[in-house]
Image (cartoon, rainbow, N blue to C red):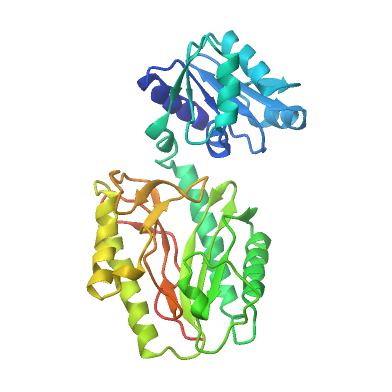
Amino acid sequence: MIFVKRIKKIRDIFNNIDADGIIICSPENRRYLSGFTGSNGFLIISNSELGFATDFRYVKQAEKECGNYEIFEIKSQPVDLLYEIIKKYNIKKLAYEDSFMTVSFYNKLKSKLKEIDFIPLKEAAGVIRIIKDKDELKLIGEAAKIADNAFTHILKLIKPGVPEKDIALELEYFMKKNGASKLSFDSIVASGKRSSLPHGIATDKVIENGDLVTLDFGCVYNGYCSDMTRTIVVGKADNRQKEIYNTVLKAQVEALSYIKAGVLGKDVDKAARDIISDAGYGDYFGHGLGHGVGLAVHEEPRLSINGEMVLEENMVVTDEPGIYIPDYGGVRIEDLIIVGEDKPIILSKSVKKLIEL
Protein backbone atom coordinates (compact mmCIF):
# COMPACT_ATOMS: atom_id res chain seq x y z
CA MET A 1 0.00 0.00 0.00
CA ILE A 2 2.80 2.43 0.87
CA PHE A 3 4.38 2.13 -2.60
CA VAL A 4 0.99 2.42 -4.33
CA LYS A 5 0.58 5.88 -2.75
CA ARG A 6 4.13 6.91 -3.61
CA ILE A 7 3.83 5.74 -7.21
CA LYS A 8 0.59 7.70 -7.57
CA LYS A 9 2.48 10.73 -6.27
CA ILE A 10 5.24 10.42 -8.87
CA ARG A 11 2.70 9.83 -11.64
CA ASP A 12 0.86 13.00 -10.64
CA ILE A 13 4.16 14.88 -10.69
CA PHE A 14 5.23 13.80 -14.17
CA ASN A 15 1.72 14.19 -15.60
CA ASN A 16 1.68 17.76 -14.27
CA ILE A 17 4.74 18.57 -16.39
CA ASP A 18 3.17 16.97 -19.49
CA ALA A 19 5.21 13.74 -19.42
CA ASP A 20 3.80 10.24 -19.73
CA GLY A 21 6.66 8.42 -18.03
CA ILE A 22 9.76 8.93 -15.93
CA ILE A 23 13.21 7.45 -15.43
CA ILE A 24 14.53 7.45 -11.87
CA CYS A 25 18.28 7.15 -11.26
CA SER A 26 18.90 8.71 -7.84
CA PRO A 27 19.33 6.18 -5.01
CA GLU A 28 16.97 8.00 -2.66
CA ASN A 29 14.07 8.32 -5.11
CA ARG A 30 14.69 4.78 -6.36
CA ARG A 31 14.36 3.40 -2.83
CA TYR A 32 11.42 5.65 -1.98
CA LEU A 33 9.42 4.45 -4.98
CA SER A 34 10.39 0.77 -5.06
CA GLY A 35 11.93 -0.34 -1.76
CA PHE A 36 15.15 -1.35 -3.51
CA THR A 37 18.15 -1.05 -1.16
CA GLY A 38 20.93 -1.95 -3.61
CA SER A 39 23.36 0.44 -5.25
CA ASN A 40 22.54 0.14 -8.96
CA GLY A 41 19.34 0.31 -10.95
CA PHE A 42 16.86 2.40 -12.91
CA LEU A 43 13.12 2.78 -12.45
CA ILE A 44 11.01 3.34 -15.54
CA ILE A 45 7.46 4.30 -14.60
CA SER A 46 4.63 5.01 -17.02
CA ASN A 47 0.98 5.63 -16.24
CA SER A 48 0.29 1.89 -16.36
CA GLU A 49 3.65 0.08 -16.05
CA LEU A 50 6.47 -0.26 -13.53
CA GLY A 51 9.89 -1.40 -14.70
CA PHE A 52 13.15 -1.91 -12.83
CA ALA A 53 16.44 -2.43 -14.65
CA THR A 54 19.55 -3.62 -12.82
CA ASP A 55 22.60 -5.77 -13.37
CA PHE A 56 23.26 -9.44 -12.55
CA ARG A 57 24.38 -8.65 -8.98
CA TYR A 58 20.99 -7.32 -7.93
CA VAL A 59 18.37 -9.19 -9.98
CA LYS A 60 17.39 -11.57 -7.18
CA GLN A 61 17.43 -8.77 -4.62
CA ALA A 62 15.18 -6.65 -6.85
CA GLU A 63 12.77 -9.54 -7.32
CA LYS A 64 12.49 -9.79 -3.54
CA GLU A 65 12.32 -6.08 -2.71
CA CYS A 66 10.41 -4.65 -5.68
CA GLY A 67 7.32 -6.82 -5.84
CA ASN A 68 5.23 -4.49 -8.00
CA TYR A 69 7.93 -4.01 -10.64
CA GLU A 70 8.75 -5.92 -13.80
CA ILE A 71 12.46 -6.78 -13.42
CA PHE A 72 14.89 -6.44 -16.34
CA GLU A 73 18.52 -7.53 -16.30
CA ILE A 74 21.12 -5.20 -17.82
CA LYS A 75 23.48 -7.43 -19.81
CA SER A 76 25.38 -4.90 -21.91
CA GLN A 77 24.89 -1.13 -22.13
CA PRO A 78 22.15 0.26 -19.82
CA VAL A 79 20.90 2.63 -22.53
CA ASP A 80 20.15 -0.28 -24.87
CA LEU A 81 17.88 -1.96 -22.32
CA LEU A 82 16.29 1.32 -21.23
CA TYR A 83 15.49 2.03 -24.87
CA GLU A 84 13.65 -1.30 -25.13
CA ILE A 85 11.70 -0.74 -21.89
CA ILE A 86 10.66 2.80 -22.81
CA LYS A 87 9.48 1.55 -26.22
CA LYS A 88 7.62 -1.36 -24.59
CA TYR A 89 5.86 1.01 -22.18
CA ASN A 90 4.95 3.35 -25.07
CA ILE A 91 6.48 6.39 -23.38
CA LYS A 92 6.69 9.39 -25.70
CA LYS A 93 7.53 12.16 -23.22
CA LEU A 94 10.06 11.11 -20.62
CA ALA A 95 10.63 13.04 -17.38
CA TYR A 96 14.10 12.76 -15.87
CA GLU A 97 15.96 13.93 -12.76
CA ASP A 98 17.97 16.78 -14.21
CA SER A 99 19.42 17.58 -10.79
CA PHE A 100 20.95 14.08 -10.56
CA MET A 101 21.47 12.57 -14.02
CA THR A 102 24.94 13.23 -15.41
CA VAL A 103 25.36 15.11 -18.67
CA SER A 104 27.22 12.11 -20.08
CA PHE A 105 24.42 9.65 -19.37
CA TYR A 106 21.77 12.12 -20.53
CA ASN A 107 23.56 12.54 -23.87
CA LYS A 108 23.84 8.76 -24.34
CA LEU A 109 20.16 8.28 -23.53
CA LYS A 110 19.02 11.14 -25.73
CA SER A 111 21.15 9.89 -28.61
CA LYS A 112 19.54 6.45 -28.34
CA LEU A 113 15.99 7.77 -27.84
CA LYS A 114 15.90 10.29 -30.66
CA GLU A 115 12.12 10.17 -31.04
CA ILE A 116 11.45 10.78 -27.32
CA ASP A 117 10.86 14.21 -25.77
CA PHE A 118 12.92 14.66 -22.59
CA ILE A 119 11.29 16.80 -19.89
CA PRO A 120 13.36 17.84 -16.84
CA LEU A 121 11.76 17.52 -13.43
CA LYS A 122 13.40 20.77 -12.27
CA GLU A 123 11.84 21.93 -8.99
CA ALA A 124 9.48 18.94 -8.96
CA ALA A 125 12.43 16.67 -8.17
CA GLY A 126 12.69 18.20 -4.72
CA VAL A 127 9.11 17.56 -3.66
CA ILE A 128 8.75 13.84 -4.31
CA ARG A 129 9.88 12.89 -0.79
CA ILE A 130 9.35 16.16 1.03
CA ILE A 131 6.29 15.19 3.12
CA LYS A 132 7.11 12.20 5.31
CA ASP A 133 4.56 9.50 6.09
CA LYS A 134 4.20 7.95 9.55
CA ASP A 135 6.57 5.07 8.74
CA GLU A 136 9.27 7.48 7.59
CA LEU A 137 8.84 9.66 10.66
CA LYS A 138 9.23 6.63 12.89
CA LEU A 139 12.48 5.61 11.19
CA ILE A 140 13.89 9.14 11.35
CA GLY A 141 12.94 9.20 15.03
CA GLU A 142 14.86 5.98 15.64
CA ALA A 143 17.93 7.41 13.88
CA ALA A 144 17.67 10.52 16.05
CA LYS A 145 17.42 8.40 19.19
CA ILE A 146 20.61 6.53 18.31
CA ALA A 147 22.40 9.85 17.82
CA ASP A 148 21.14 11.18 21.15
CA ASN A 149 22.40 8.07 22.91
CA ALA A 150 25.74 8.44 21.14
CA PHE A 151 26.08 11.99 22.47
CA THR A 152 25.41 10.84 26.04
CA HIS A 153 28.01 8.12 25.57
CA ILE A 154 30.69 10.31 24.02
CA LEU A 155 30.58 12.90 26.81
CA LYS A 156 32.23 10.32 29.07
CA LEU A 157 35.23 10.10 26.72
CA ILE A 158 35.93 13.73 25.83
CA LYS A 159 38.85 15.05 27.86
CA PRO A 160 42.23 16.73 27.38
CA GLY A 161 44.71 14.56 25.50
CA VAL A 162 42.16 12.69 23.37
CA PRO A 163 42.49 13.19 19.58
CA GLU A 164 39.46 14.38 17.64
CA LYS A 165 39.71 11.28 15.43
CA ASP A 166 39.27 9.00 18.44
CA ILE A 167 36.03 10.77 19.33
CA ALA A 168 34.77 10.46 15.74
CA LEU A 169 35.66 6.76 15.60
CA GLU A 170 33.90 6.09 18.89
CA LEU A 171 30.78 7.89 17.70
CA GLU A 172 30.73 5.73 14.57
CA TYR A 173 31.33 2.52 16.52
CA PHE A 174 28.63 3.32 19.08
CA MET A 175 25.99 4.22 16.52
CA LYS A 176 26.66 1.14 14.39
CA LYS A 177 26.76 -1.04 17.49
CA ASN A 178 23.33 0.30 18.45
CA GLY A 179 21.41 -0.21 15.22
CA ALA A 180 22.75 2.21 12.63
CA SER A 181 23.77 0.84 9.23
CA LYS A 182 26.17 3.70 8.51
CA LEU A 183 26.84 7.36 9.20
CA SER A 184 24.69 10.07 7.63
CA PHE A 185 27.97 11.89 6.82
CA ASP A 186 31.55 11.98 8.09
CA SER A 187 31.27 13.07 11.71
CA ILE A 188 32.46 16.59 12.49
CA VAL A 189 34.61 16.81 15.61
CA ALA A 190 36.31 20.21 15.74
CA SER A 191 38.05 21.50 18.85
CA GLY A 192 39.72 24.75 19.88
CA LYS A 193 40.33 27.12 16.98
CA ARG A 194 39.19 24.38 14.59
CA SER A 195 35.64 24.72 15.95
CA SER A 196 35.43 27.85 13.78
CA LEU A 197 35.31 25.51 10.76
CA PRO A 198 31.61 24.72 10.10
CA HIS A 199 32.60 21.39 8.50
CA GLY A 200 35.73 20.61 10.50
CA ILE A 201 36.14 16.87 9.94
CA ALA A 202 38.04 15.19 12.78
CA THR A 203 41.84 15.31 12.65
CA ASP A 204 44.76 14.17 14.80
CA LYS A 205 44.48 17.37 16.84
CA VAL A 206 44.41 16.63 20.55
CA ILE A 207 41.63 18.15 22.63
CA GLU A 208 42.95 20.64 25.18
CA ASN A 209 41.62 22.17 28.37
CA GLY A 210 39.54 25.26 27.56
CA ASP A 211 38.62 24.08 24.07
CA LEU A 212 35.23 24.55 22.50
CA VAL A 213 34.37 21.20 20.89
CA THR A 214 31.72 21.01 18.17
CA LEU A 215 30.21 17.59 17.49
CA ASP A 216 28.02 17.32 14.37
CA PHE A 217 27.00 13.77 13.52
CA GLY A 218 24.17 11.47 12.55
CA CYS A 219 23.40 7.96 11.43
CA VAL A 220 21.26 6.00 9.01
CA TYR A 221 18.60 3.66 10.36
CA ASN A 222 16.80 1.49 7.81
CA GLY A 223 17.64 4.01 5.12
CA TYR A 224 16.69 7.19 7.00
CA CYS A 225 19.10 9.80 8.36
CA SER A 226 19.51 11.78 11.53
CA ASP A 227 21.56 14.94 12.04
CA MET A 228 22.39 16.78 15.26
CA THR A 229 25.03 19.15 16.63
CA ARG A 230 26.11 20.05 20.13
CA THR A 231 29.02 22.22 21.25
CA ILE A 232 30.64 21.74 24.65
CA VAL A 233 33.56 23.24 26.55
CA VAL A 234 36.34 21.13 28.02
CA GLY A 235 36.98 22.69 31.41
CA LYS A 236 35.37 25.96 32.50
CA ALA A 237 33.94 28.25 29.84
CA ASP A 238 35.21 31.83 29.85
CA ASN A 239 32.92 34.84 29.46
CA ARG A 240 33.41 35.12 25.70
CA GLN A 241 32.63 31.45 25.15
CA LYS A 242 29.50 31.79 27.28
CA GLU A 243 28.38 34.88 25.36
CA ILE A 244 28.78 33.18 21.99
CA TYR A 245 27.14 29.99 23.17
CA ASN A 246 24.16 31.77 24.71
CA THR A 247 23.68 33.88 21.57
CA VAL A 248 23.54 30.77 19.39
CA LEU A 249 21.21 29.02 21.84
CA LYS A 250 18.88 32.02 21.92
CA ALA A 251 18.79 32.08 18.11
CA GLN A 252 18.20 28.34 17.92
CA VAL A 253 15.30 28.44 20.37
CA GLU A 254 13.76 31.50 18.71
CA ALA A 255 13.80 29.75 15.33
CA LEU A 256 12.05 26.77 16.88
CA SER A 257 9.10 28.99 17.75
CA TYR A 258 8.70 29.82 14.03
CA ILE A 259 8.80 26.25 12.73
CA LYS A 260 5.23 25.27 11.89
CA ALA A 261 3.03 24.69 8.86
CA GLY A 262 2.42 27.76 6.72
CA VAL A 263 5.70 29.56 7.42
CA LEU A 264 8.30 30.36 4.76
CA GLY A 265 11.74 28.80 5.21
CA LYS A 266 13.39 32.21 4.87
CA ASP A 267 11.32 33.60 7.74
CA VAL A 268 12.56 30.89 10.09
CA ASP A 269 16.12 31.65 9.00
CA LYS A 270 15.56 35.37 9.62
CA ALA A 271 14.32 34.77 13.16
CA ALA A 272 17.65 33.20 14.11
CA ARG A 273 19.82 35.43 11.92
CA ASP A 274 18.42 38.63 13.41
CA ILE A 275 19.36 37.57 16.93
CA ILE A 276 22.91 36.71 15.91
CA SER A 277 23.26 39.94 13.92
CA ASP A 278 21.86 42.07 16.74
CA ALA A 279 24.47 40.57 19.05
CA GLY A 280 27.20 41.72 16.67
CA TYR A 281 28.05 38.32 15.18
CA GLY A 282 26.17 38.51 11.87
CA ASP A 283 29.34 38.25 9.80
CA TYR A 284 30.19 34.97 11.52
CA PHE A 285 26.98 33.11 10.58
CA GLY A 286 27.53 32.34 6.92
CA HIS A 287 25.35 29.32 6.18
CA GLY A 288 21.62 28.67 6.04
CA LEU A 289 19.75 27.86 9.22
CA GLY A 290 18.66 24.38 8.20
CA HIS A 291 17.68 21.81 5.61
CA GLY A 292 15.38 18.88 5.08
CA VAL A 293 16.36 15.37 6.21
CA GLY A 294 15.07 11.99 5.11
CA LEU A 295 16.54 9.30 2.87
CA ALA A 296 19.20 11.94 2.17
CA VAL A 297 20.75 13.99 4.95
CA HIS A 298 20.44 17.18 2.87
CA GLU A 299 17.21 17.62 0.93
CA GLU A 300 14.29 20.02 0.58
CA PRO A 301 13.06 22.21 2.16
CA ARG A 302 15.78 24.77 2.88
CA LEU A 303 15.67 27.16 5.82
CA SER A 304 17.85 29.93 4.42
CA ILE A 305 17.70 33.50 3.18
CA ASN A 306 16.55 32.01 -0.16
CA GLY A 307 14.03 29.60 1.36
CA GLU A 308 10.86 30.39 -0.57
CA MET A 309 9.13 27.08 0.17
CA VAL A 310 6.22 27.11 2.62
CA LEU A 311 6.66 24.59 5.41
CA GLU A 312 4.04 21.85 5.63
CA GLU A 313 3.11 19.40 8.33
CA ASN A 314 5.39 16.31 8.48
CA MET A 315 8.33 17.87 6.71
CA VAL A 316 11.53 17.12 8.64
CA VAL A 317 14.10 19.90 9.00
CA THR A 318 17.13 20.95 11.02
CA ASP A 319 17.53 24.13 13.05
CA GLU A 320 21.27 24.80 13.32
CA PRO A 321 22.48 28.38 13.76
CA GLY A 322 26.16 28.95 14.41
CA ILE A 323 28.84 31.53 15.09
CA TYR A 324 32.33 30.85 13.70
CA ILE A 325 35.17 33.24 14.56
CA PRO A 326 38.43 32.55 12.66
CA ASP A 327 41.47 31.81 14.83
CA TYR A 328 39.25 31.66 17.90
CA GLY A 329 36.50 29.05 17.74
CA GLY A 330 32.86 28.47 17.04
CA VAL A 331 29.54 27.20 18.33
CA ARG A 332 26.71 25.40 16.56
CA ILE A 333 23.58 23.89 18.10
CA GLU A 334 21.33 21.71 15.95
CA ASP A 335 18.07 19.86 16.49
CA LEU A 336 16.22 17.54 14.12
CA ILE A 337 12.57 18.58 13.91
CA ILE A 338 9.23 17.46 12.50
CA VAL A 339 7.14 20.39 11.27
CA GLY A 340 3.83 20.31 13.11
CA GLU A 341 0.52 21.98 12.36
CA ASP A 342 1.12 24.72 14.94
CA LYS A 343 4.42 23.85 16.65
CA PRO A 344 7.59 21.81 16.07
CA ILE A 345 8.12 18.26 17.25
CA ILE A 346 11.72 18.08 18.39
CA LEU A 347 13.38 14.71 17.76
CA SER A 348 16.79 15.65 19.20
CA LYS A 349 16.42 15.24 22.96
CA SER A 350 20.00 15.94 24.10
CA VAL A 351 20.40 18.80 26.55
CA LYS A 352 21.21 22.19 25.03
CA LYS A 353 22.44 24.07 28.06
CA LEU A 354 26.19 24.71 28.01
CA ILE A 355 28.04 21.59 29.10
CA GLU A 356 31.41 22.10 30.79
CA LEU A 357 33.38 18.88 31.15
Left or right: residue 183 compared with residue 10: right
Residue that appears at 58% across and 46% down: 223
Taking depth in this image into account, of 106 and 340 the one nearest to the observer is: 106
Q: Is residue 256 left or right of residue 176?
A: left
Q: Is residue 92 left or right of residue 258?
A: right
Tell me where residue 6 appears, x and y as whole percent: 47, 30
Q: Position of residue 97 (x, y in %)?
A: 49, 30
User: Measured along the vertical axis of the image, is residue 312 above or below residue 73?
Assistant: below
The residue under the point 58% across, 38% down is 27
Q: 190 above or below 50?
A: below
Task: Report the number of numbered marks.
Answer: 0
Q: Would residue 276 be visible to someone looking at this image?
A: yes
Q: Is residue 31 above or below residue 107?
A: below
Residue 357 vs residue 240, the one in the foreground = 240
Please name the residue shown 48% across and 47% down the image.
294
Foreground of the two, 105 or 228: 105
Q: Decide if residue 116 is on the left or right side of residue 41.
A: left
Quarter residue 269 falls in? bottom left
- Eyeballing the image, is 114 above or below 197? above
Where residue 107 sits in the image (x, y, percent)?
57, 24
Within the image, what quadrant is residue 186 found in? bottom right
Q: Position of residue 102 (x, y in %)?
A: 56, 33
Q: Nearer the viewer, residue 109 or 151?
A: 109
Q: Can residue 213 be seen by looking at this rendering?
A: no
Residue at image coords 29%, 55%: 259
